[in-house]
């Protein structure tokens, strides 16, 4: 673990510290790059299951067991990009462990350590009453996070994510191509179903953390709103 040296941060910067989980995923990896490049953050902590290859003066990496997290460092902003698929997880139970249990373990530990803002990536269609298992788990996760009482909770519900995936299958590539062709045809109420770049989601998550003149509370951003934040 590399200890942060305050002298490395430019003077005059409004400093905050960030904690990122899910830094090796599609959105998390682009978010990590953006956070490290953002001079408003003096240090960026990551929680990972095994050592990552990224190295940076502001990066402080912790290898953890998400089922039994240690006491977390005190940070201002938490960015959660934890998530998997039922196919990758291997079962619905394993999926629930990652997308609900691990997220909640993180949130409780972060709240206990004094984090003020929690930014979490959920999914379009998340609903605790949904008949679709994936959407139901995401909805249950959102409801459970609301009950923790963060000063600010920012929930992002992107549509189909586009980007350079570590694991790419032929069928998935065809699906992405088809979705990108259809997306420009979606207007009005259907605009929220447009595909969105993972880099844009990452940009919007950081923007939400720095929104000015807002009250404490819970904020939910649909995919089209995320796009507007990224383009602003």
Image (cartoon, helix red, strand yellow):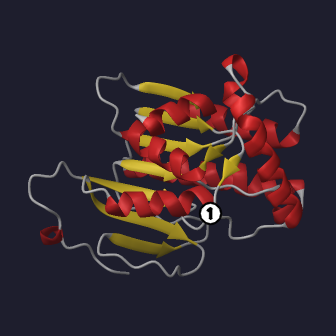
Please say if 68 is above or below 142: below
Give whichever of 163, 205 is nearer the camera.
Answer: 163
Per the image, label 1 sits on a secondary structure element best described as loop
- Where in the figure is residue 147, as x and y percent of width and height? 57, 31
- Please name whichever residue, 22 or 175, is drawn nearer the observer in this view of the structure: 175
Q: Residue at x 36, y 71 (%)?
A: 59
For mark 1, what is the residue? Answer: 25
Question: Which residue shows up at 76% across the image and 42% down it?
Answer: 181
Q: Quadrant of the C terminus?
A: top left
Which residue occupies the extreme top position in the image?
188
Q: Residue furthest left?
A: 11
Q: Where residue 140 sits: x, y (%)?
A: 72, 36
Name the image quarter holding residue 90. Answer: bottom right
Give above or below for 176 relative to 145.
below
Q: Position of residue 56 (x, y in %)?
A: 35, 76
Is 154 situated above or below 6? above
Residue 134 in view here: yes
């Amino acid at each position: 673990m590399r200890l942060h040296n305050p002298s490395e941060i430019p003077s005059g910067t409004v400093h905050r510290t960030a904690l990122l989980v899910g830094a090796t995923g599609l959105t998390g990896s682009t978010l990590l790059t953006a956070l490290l490049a953002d001079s408003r953050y003096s240090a960026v902590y990551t929680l990972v299951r095994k050592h990552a290859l990224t190295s940076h003066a502001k990066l402080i990496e912790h290898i953890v067991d998400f089922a039994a997290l240690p006491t977390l460092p005190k940070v201002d902003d938490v960015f959660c990009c934890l998530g998997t698929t039922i196919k990758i997880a291997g079962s619905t139970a394993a999926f629930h462990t990652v997308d609900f249990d691990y997220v909640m373990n993180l949130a409780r530990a972060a709240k206990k350590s004094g984090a003020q803002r929690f930014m979490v990536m959920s999914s379009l269609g998340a609903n605790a009453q949904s008949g679709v298992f994936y959407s139901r788990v995401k909805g249950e996760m959102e409801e459970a996070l609301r009950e923790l009482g963060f000063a600010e909770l920012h929930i992002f519900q992107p549509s189909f994510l586009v980007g350079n995936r570590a694991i790419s299958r032929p069928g998935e590539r065809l699906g992405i191509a088809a979705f990108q062709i259809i997306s420009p045809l979606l207007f009005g109420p259907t605009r929220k179903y447009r595909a969105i770049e993972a880099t844009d989601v990452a940009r919007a998550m950081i923007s939400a953390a720095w929104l000015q003149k807002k009250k404490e509370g819970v904020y939910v951003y649909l995919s089209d709103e995320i796009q507007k934040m990224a383009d602003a």
